[in-house]
């Protein structure tokens, strides 16, 4: 009999998480403004650029008032928050454009990179984990496990530089960075796909070890359980036992990993975007941080925090769907 999906319980869990996210996001935004206020960087000088070196103090003070940088911390934070609730994220001082416009034109490219890389990590990590877990201690298990432990310690930017040297400079089979070819002034799907290969593979491989190790451990432990051994003793084929029993049981711990890897995915994406000159939110994040661009920095931080909270919610929902014993009301 087909099991009905507990939509009501899932909706209640989602509602509870949404309510709990409100104070978290408030605290995060306030912390951003507090850290920026304590920073030694002067947003007015960053906004003025080289012109600020020769500007009079009167002009700098007027510019500070125009930017609202002369207001107390609580006032700046509250003004930004009340405007953000209505959809107005303010204007980026360093980019001279509305924050919403800056994010909207870059977020899609970052999502494309992150989703593609996550798919690579999950698919390859699961496949290799199953193959290694079904024969733990074998040649494939030892080789892939050693590589996984090595990749865990390898920074994403180092993997990116290595990939550029080998595939772009030495072999010349893939572009070294950017979104389109140097001589092209239009964005086409085939160019984007070619330029996406290296950054997506690098980011995906940097996340792969954790998925591989979780699946390997889960599948290996499941194959040693009494119900699985009993199924094999009844004459079921190894493939049927693996796919119908061990794989489902072994995949459960991996589901919780999906959400917990989101912070690392965001951090890795920022590094990979920088290395490959990918036009995502990495450059905007770096400029906002170094220039103490309050509105842009707060909006990007809220976006990253919301992504982490959504990832954790997704993990719990997937785990509850895969294992009815867990439920959604706990």
Image (cartoon, grey):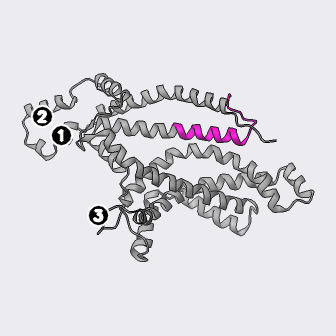
Question: What kind of element bears circle 3?
Answer: loop
Q: Which residues are magenta?
A: 309-330
Mark 1 highlights which residue?
A: 45
Q: Which mark is residue 60?
A: 2
Between disc 2 and disc 3, whose residue precedes? 2
Q: Position of residue 70 (x, y in %)?
A: 20, 27
For disc 1, the neighbor class at 10 Å (few under 14, some 14 to 19, many from 20) is some
In the rendered image, which quarter contains the C terminus? top right
Between disc 3 and disc 1, whose residue precedes? 1
Q: Position of residue 190 (x, y in %)?
A: 42, 66
Q: Is residue 139 left or right of residue 296?
A: right
Question: What kind of element bears circle 1?
Answer: helix
Q: Is residue 258 visible?
A: yes
Q: CA distance from mark 3 to mark 1?
A: 34 Å
Mark 3 highlights which residue?
A: 185
In the rendered image, which quarter contains the N terminus? top right
């Amino acid at each position: 009999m087909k099991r009905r999906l507990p939509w009501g319980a899932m909706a209640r869990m989602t509602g509870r998480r949404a309510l709990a996210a409100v104070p978290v996001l408030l605290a995060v935004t306030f912390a951003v403004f507090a850290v920026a206020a304590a920073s030694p960087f002067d947003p007015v000088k960053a906004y003025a650029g080289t012109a600020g070196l020769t500007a009079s103090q009167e002009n700098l003070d007027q510019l500070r008032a125009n930017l609202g940088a002369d207001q107390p911390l609580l006032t700046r934070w509250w003004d930004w928050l009340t405007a953000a609730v209505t959809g107005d994220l303010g204007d980026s001082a360093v980019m001279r454009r509305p924050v919403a416009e800056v994010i909207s034109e870059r977020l899609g490219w970052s999502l494309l990179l992150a989703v593609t890389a996550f798919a690579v990590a999950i698919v390859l990590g699961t496949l290799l984990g199953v193959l290694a877990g079904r024969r733990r201690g074998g040649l494939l298990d030892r080789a892939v496990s050693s590589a996984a432990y090595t990749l865990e310690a390898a920074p994403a930017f180092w993997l990116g530089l290595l990939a550029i040297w080998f595939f772009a400079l030495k072999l010349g089979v893939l572009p070294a960075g950017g979104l389109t070819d140097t001589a092209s002034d239009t964005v086409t799907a085939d160019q984007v796909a070619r330029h996406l290969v290296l950054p997506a593979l690098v980011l995906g491989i940097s996340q792969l070890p954790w998925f591989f190790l979780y699946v390997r451990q889960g599948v290996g432990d499941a194959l040693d359980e009494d119900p699985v051994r009993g199924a094999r003793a009844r004459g079921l084929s190894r493939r049927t036992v693996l796919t119908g029993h061990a794989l489902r049981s072994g995949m459960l711990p991996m589901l919780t990993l999906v959400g917990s890897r989101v912070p690392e995915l965001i951090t890795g994406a920022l590094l990979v975007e920088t290395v490959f000159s990918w036009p995502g939110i990495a450059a905007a994040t770096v400029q906002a941080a170094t220039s103490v661009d309050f509105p842009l920095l707060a909006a990007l931080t809220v976006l990253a925090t919301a992504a982490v909270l959504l990832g954790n919610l997704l993990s719990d929902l997937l785990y509850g769907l895969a294992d009815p014993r867990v439920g959604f009301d706990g």
